[in-house]
Image (spheres, rainbow, N blue to C red):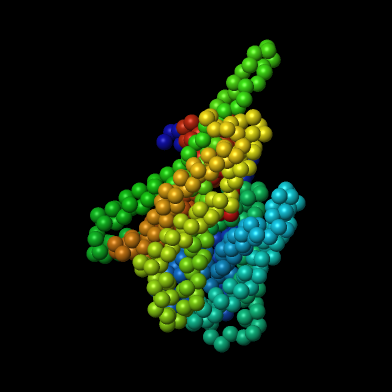
């Protein structure tokens, strides 16, 4: 504890780090205030009464929006349209040569891609805004007899809310600490955690298991957090040697051994986000609840929903790992710099060797990812309240753990660069920046 307190004091001593943290907290506060600014003309009392028992899709969307979805806030769509647009642009990069060229053009290409992503975000919001208003706000009595002017104004406000949230995220990334978009999603998730815990505690103290069951649930929650940390941090180190070089004295010297860190979960939370986006489609199509097949795929507690969800996560884990890590490029870079894997010939054999290792560690990684993703369903079947069960695994757990570790790693880097000890003794935090790949979340 003394070491931790000293680290907090060191954080305050580093002026740049202190300013970045304060700047980040201020923008997060602005984002949270925005989630409570309600669309004009909304009857919040009627909306809250109709939304007392939300379905699985509504609960999930409200979780990511930090309560803005159920509040009919101007931030109701959250940052997810921007995430969807980013995913679409990444997929287009695999099939469209023009997008591939922009991805390889450095800073200028990145600016063009960001421009197209923002435009696509507006288009997605323009489709999602009317759906949200019609299928949620109006259907639950949030407003009666809306005029054309109200529709136009509300849709524009929803688009503006998402674009403002995107702008806040980009400012945090540029001038704050951590990945801004990821932090906004994490803050939205964490904002629901205290109330979910209080609700679960009241339910248990009301006679459903008592304090002992609540303690068991908390212990299970912390155990899942530990497992998630292992998944996020798990690394397979491939040893690398470099060719001997001539020292100044005329003697040959061997450079220090290095390694390539291949992560067990190289794709981060993207497979779950991809899969979750697909799994929301049956519920949106079958909003009236008339089709038995779609009902089965919309029941987030049911067998078929979770079986398909887990399968999609496994498939997308392989898919996203394949498009973010290129063994051939890694092998070429090693050969160019005089590096080699001991016992493996440089070039094609090294690429095949790395690809084989990557395939072997991706399989258990995808299974663990799928396992964590469907834990909430098992928790609900075991009697855990829906709101608290959403935090015992799934996308929310992986996002929280991944973003927290990434932010801590950035803070640790600032401390170590200024000759302070890190947050953990020895500076052992490994965030996602240590990975060969990058992701949106």
Q: Is residue 164 above or below residue 406?
A: below
Residue 408, visible in the rendered structure: no
Residue 121 showing in the rendered view: yes
The residue sitting at 57% across, 41% down in the picture is 351
| Residue drawn at the location 65% of the way across and 59% of the way down | 95
Of the pair 244 and 313, the residue shown nearer to us = 244
Camera-nearest residue between 278 and 219? 278
Work out which quarter of the rendered image holds the N terminus and state it: top left
* In this picture, residue 108 sits left or right of residue 69: right
Residue sitting at 49 percent across and 62 percent down? 275
Q: Note whether 93 is above or below 8 in the view shown.
A: below
Residue 358: percent from left, percent from top: 50, 44
User: Farthest residue toward the right?
Assistant: 108
Q: Position of residue 371 (x, y in %)?
A: 39, 55
Q: Look at the picture and state if 388 lies above or below 418.
A: below
Asked if residue 306 lies left or right of residue 186, the reply is left
Q: Quadrant of the C terminus?
A: bottom right
Q: Position of residue 308 (x, y in %)?
A: 42, 64
Name the foreground residue: 335 vs 425. Answer: 335
Q: How many numbered badges does the structure rendering display?
A: 0
User: Closer to the camera, 89 or 200?
Assistant: 89
Task: Indicate the position of residue 33 as horizontal and vertical percent values.
Answer: 56, 62
Residue at horizontal 47 percent and vertical 67 percent from the top: 279
Q: Residue furthest top?
A: 249
């Amino acid at each position: 504890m003394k070491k931790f307190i000293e680290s907090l004091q060191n954080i305050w001593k580093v002026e740049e780090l202190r300013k970045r943290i304060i700047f980040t907290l201020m923008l997060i506060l602005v984002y949270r205030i925005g989630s409570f600014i309600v669309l004009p003309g909304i009857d919040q009392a009627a909306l809250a009464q109709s939304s007392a028992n939300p379905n699985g899709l509504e609960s999930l969307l409200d979780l990511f929006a930090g309560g803005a979805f159920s509040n009919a806030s101007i931030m109701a769509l959250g940052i997810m349209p921007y995430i969807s647009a980013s995913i679409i642009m990444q997929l287009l990069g695999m099939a469209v040569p023009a997008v591939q060229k922009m991805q390889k053009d450095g800073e200028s290409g990145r600016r063009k891609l960001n421009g197209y992503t923002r435009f696509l975000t507006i288009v997605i919001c323009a489709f999602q805004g009317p759906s949200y208003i019609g299928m949620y706000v109006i259907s639950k009595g949030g407003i009666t007899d809306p005029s054309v002017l109200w529709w136009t104004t509300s849709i524009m406000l929803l688009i503006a809310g998402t674009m403002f949230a995107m702008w806040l995220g980009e400012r945090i990334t540029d001038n704050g600490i951590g990945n801004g978009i990821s932090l906004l999603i994490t803050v939205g998730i964490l904002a629901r955690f205290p109330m979910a815990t209080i609700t679960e505690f009241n339910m248990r103290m009301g006679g459903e298991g008592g304090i002992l069951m609540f303690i068991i649930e908390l212990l299970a929650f912390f155990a899942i957090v530990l497992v998630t940390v292992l998944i996020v941090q798990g690394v397979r180190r491939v040893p690398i040697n470099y060719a001997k070089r001539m020292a100044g004295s005329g003697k040959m010297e061997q450079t220090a051994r290095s390694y390539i860190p291949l992560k067990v979960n190289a794709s981060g939370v993207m497979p779950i986000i991809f899969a979750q986006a697909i799994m929301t489609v049956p519920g949106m199509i079958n909003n009236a609840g008339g089709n038995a097949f779609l009902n089965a795929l919309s029941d987030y507690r049911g067998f078929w929903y979770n079986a398909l969800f887990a399968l999609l996560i496994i498939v997308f884990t392989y898919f996203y790992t394949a498009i973010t890590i290129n063994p051939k490029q890694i092998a070429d870079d090693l050969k160019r710099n005089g590096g080699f894997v001991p016992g493996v010939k440089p070039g094609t054999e090294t690429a095949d060797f790395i690809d084989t290792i990557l395939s072997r560690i991706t399989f258990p990684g995808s299974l663990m990812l799928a396992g964590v993703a469907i834990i909430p369903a098992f928790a609900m079947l075991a009697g855990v309240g829906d709101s608290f069960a959403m935090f015992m695994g799934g996308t929310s757990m992986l996002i929280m753990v991944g973003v927290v570790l990434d932010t801590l790693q950035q803070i640790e880097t600032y401390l170590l660069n200024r000759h302070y000890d890190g947050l953990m003794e020895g500076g052992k935090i490994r965030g996602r920046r240590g990975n060969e790949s990058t992701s949106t979340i």
